[in-house]
Amino acid sequence: MPPSTWKRASAFGHIVWEGIAICGLSLPFLIVGAASLSRGFMSHEHAHLIEKALLVRDRGRLEWIGFAYPPLPVLMLLPWPILPAAVILASLSGGLLAWSVGRRLQALPFPPWIRAGLLLSFMGMPTILFLATQRFGTTMALVLFLWAWQAYLTFTRYGRTDAGFLAALIIGFAFYASFYAPAFALTFALAAPLFAHTRDPRHTLAILMVLAFPTAMTVGAWIYLSWLFTGQPLAFLYDPGSSLLIAFRPDEAFLTLGAMAHELVQRLLNTPLYLGVGVLIAHLQPRRLPAYLIPLLLMVSVWSLGGVFPRELSVALGALFALSGIPARTPLRWGIPLMVLALLQLGVDGFSTRYGERERWWAALWAEKPSTADAVEEEIAARLARLPCGSVLADDRQAYRLIARAGTACPFVLPPDPTFQLAVSRPERFVRWLLVAESPQGAIGPLEARYRLRAPPGFMLEASWPGWRLYRRQAP
């Protein structure tokens, strides 16, 4: 066999084995995801992505992807907009994330059992299990953030410009999976001059342009496409029906510096491994410390601008930066302390499940049957799915979970539809049913503002469930 053919065969075999490894690391997440599916649990993020994919598919208009930010996970769900597909894709993304961490751990001089223990403790964290089964878009973004940061470290450590370009391109592409990508790009760019060997302003400007330009182009391209297809270039930033902020339902509302500082300290205490590796880097490679502190700078920056930064994302980033940031020349004596910190991280994360959606997911895993809320959603969705196309007026800013469970957007008249505003004003002329949320979460749309307290003229209450009312048009 010629040497070139042998090399190609060897490279192909290597890719196959890497694929098998990723699938193997995805298996624990698939098992946990299957358990949550059997309990009828569906996360807000998966409901949001599935509903938008259903809207694009059933309307047959791909340009409506402008209503579905972030577009990358929606496009990947487009061929199969169902909950099991979202869980499978999330699990595969989790396996890819674990594989990336494992590849980085192989560079450490620790014994194999310590490296394996570090990886398994990461995969066993409830936060990682939650993200890698219930938040497909977020897990995909974490993979891209990790790859970008590893390339960024190569750029700042060795001065390799190709690694800098690669980090910038990856973080720019990550914007299509997460709206936190521009903040990462800005933080990368502002921190990079700290590693420069010269203080020439031209050199600093070149670094800033290299790291920030791809993300700026990506954001600009998305704004242009949104304006071209929807006429609303910035709707994905403020419309709760198109922004993935609806999927987080955040509790964060820090109005004072003291509240922000308290939350920051609490999150740091919940990530002992991140603190320990930070001390190690400060001792061995202090020049790398600014890059290691990027998650903290990013969190504070987002809060200062009035944004939210979910706890699950901060915990996951802390664990990722810690495990992938351990210096390659760390002495062997640090192996066991780091292992202890990883196990402590696992324990602390296990005791910190009682907040937000993660608490409901954790309870669903141990429940014997679906919760009452999930059962009610399934009942409503099954009833709505049988109705004729274009017969139900609803607002997907509130009803996105029901549409996702129904598995079709055909029966609904929704805000992206041209007739939605007219149907809100004169529902008797356009639809036969109205689905109205009694207690809207987030921004109140025009449908709930008009009809959540009373039925529209010519309609009567046909059915009601906790939080929902279904009105039917009376026969003329």
Image (spheres, rainbow, N blue to C red):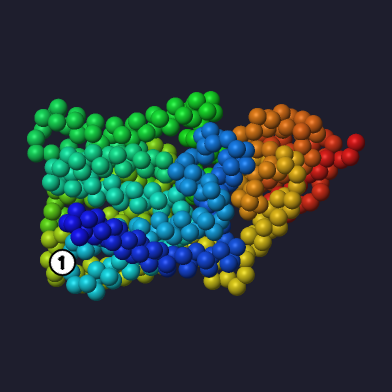
Neighbor class of circle 1 (other Cα within 10 Å; few <14, some 14-19, many 20+) is some
Residue that sits furthest to the right in the current view: 476
Comparing 316 with 101, the one in front is 101
Residue that sits furthest to the front in the current view: 1
**Visible in this render: residue 230?**
yes
Residue 447 vertical placement versus 148 (above, below): above
Label 1 element class: loop
| Left or right of 22, for residue 393 | right
Q: Which residue is mark 1?
A: 109
Comparing 129 with 55, the one in front is 55
- Residue displayed at 44% across by 27% down: 224
Work out which quarter of the rendered image holds the N terminus and state it. Answer: bottom left
Q: Amino acid at mark 1?
A: Pro
Residue 199 vertical placement versus 355 (above, below): above
| Left or right of 197, for residue 60 | right
**Visible in this render: residue 301?**
no
| Left or right of 209, for residue 473 | right
- Residue displayed at 53% across by 25% down: 231
Q: Position of residue 459 (x, y in %)?
A: 83, 40
Q: Position of residue 105 (x, y in %)?
A: 23, 62
Work out which quarter of the rendered image holds the C terminus and state it. Answer: top right
Corner quadrant of residue 211 = top left
Q: Position of residue 192 (x, y in %)?
A: 20, 40
